[in-house]
Amino acid sequence: MDYFIITSILVFISAFFGYLNVRFIKLPNTIGLTVITIIFTLGIFALSYFDDTLLNAERYIITHIDFKSVLLDIMLSFLLFAGALHTDLQKLKELKWPILFFATFGVLASTFLIGIAVYFMLQGIGLDVQFIYCLLFGALISPTDPIAVLGILKKANVPKKLEIKIVGESLFNDGVGVVIFLTIFGLASGTGGGFSLSGILSLFVHEVGGGLLLGALLGWITFKLMKSIDDYDIEVIITLATVMTGTVIAQYLHVSAPLAMVVAGLIVGGNTARRQAMSELTENYVDKFWELIDILLNTILFVLIGMELLVLDLEIEFILAGLLVIPIALICRYVSLVIPVNVYKNRLDFVPNTNLIMTWGGLRGAISIALALGLTAEMNRELFLVMTYVVVIFSIIVQGLTVGKLVKRLRKKNVGI
């Protein structure tokens, strides 16, 4: 079975499950596809007691897909560019400092808070895990997932001035989170044996700063090329080339491709570029093309998340640890946002309960699973993979379904939202 057949099967499953959701279940696509795929996988498990043909076929597909590589090296660039393309750059500029604070200090604080709490929690239930590995788990679970966040917030009716904070943070903090994860991974695996504080800072600046600069350059070049012609089909292809070529260049330069794609998408989708470089016809085609890419990849991605259930080592202790880490992750995120919110709330007119809504609306998703899949056996990969999966599924389904209700309830209490 080659990659074309596997891809064809995934697209077919995604289309079929997407149809079932839209036609009958009517949940937001992100949630509906995850739920249907998990139910489908559990059904295959049950059927395998009589006939394991479907189970073996699904396992073959999932074991022949390098989820970590497919998501982090390929899909993420397209999804982040598409998400950034439809984000209001002007509003994002007004909130650039708090978003930067959320995406750096917030992720760092959350990483250490979760790492410390998980270390003691695991000791308490009889699982002896080294602290550095718990810190690694804190790094992979701390970033909110822009893919999940963007999909849910569109239907959650979150106030616009708060939505842009959550979306802006999620667009940037995954790139920062990946850099923090890779830094701690190097320390934990011994490959970063010569690491010092200055070395860690240098790596961080190179990855993050380099990604931002590359994204700005790519966005500017794309803008200039699109401005010099008026041909909607070629201009759409130029945006596609920006993402694909930019990702390759970022990997070659060892800078953050996700951050580069976010910045490039914000520039190309900004008001200036739309007004000066795109005709109305071009703008419509560019938007529709990237909306289609976004929907297609999101659909496949959340089907894959559901299918990842097949690779989990579902021991009772691992599941218990996963359930216990849900409140830990939420509390640590809430605490990590206290300082950034309080620093900026008066100057930027933050809505009441910003902390609460950003905590519940900051969903974890596929990026965390991809990073967990990259752990080694010595880093307690199976344990942390189950814990990550439990947190992600809770986040997508429970938080995703209730964040709109939370906002509605807070509005009824006249808290000024």
Image: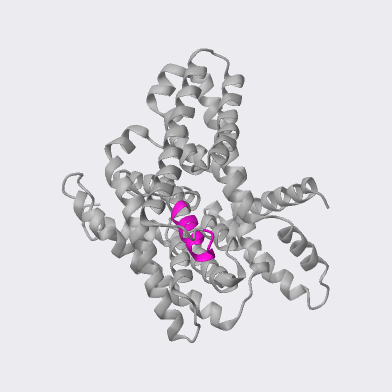
User: Which residue appears farthest toward the front when viewing the image?
Assistant: 194
Q: Tell me the quarter of the picture where residue 319 sits.
A: bottom right
Above/below status of 320 relative to 270? below
Q: Give the color scheme: rainbow, by chain, secondary structure or one colour.
A: one colour
Count of marks overlaid on the render: 0
Residue 403 in the image: above or below residue 326: above
Q: Is residue 406 something that shows in the picture? A: no
In the rendering, at what x and y percent does residue 182 appear?
A: 49, 56
Which residue occupies 77% across, 48% down?
Answer: 3
Q: Residue at x 65, y 50 (%)?
A: 19
* Residue 187 painted magenta: yes
Q: Which residues are magenta?
A: 179-191
Vertically, is 232 above or below 209? above
Residue 257 shown in magenta? no
Q: Is residue 416 above or below residue 185?
A: above
- Residue 46 location, x and y as percent? 73, 75
Measured from the top left, where is residue 216 in percent x and y?
A: 43, 30
Q: Nearer the viewer, residue 20 or 187?
A: 187
Identified at 61% across, 55% down, the residue is: 68
Does the image show residue 113? yes
Which secondary structure dominates the residues rendered in magenta? helix
Using the image as rendered, state which of residue 369 and residue 415 is in the foreground: 369
Side of 383 relative to 112 (left or right): right
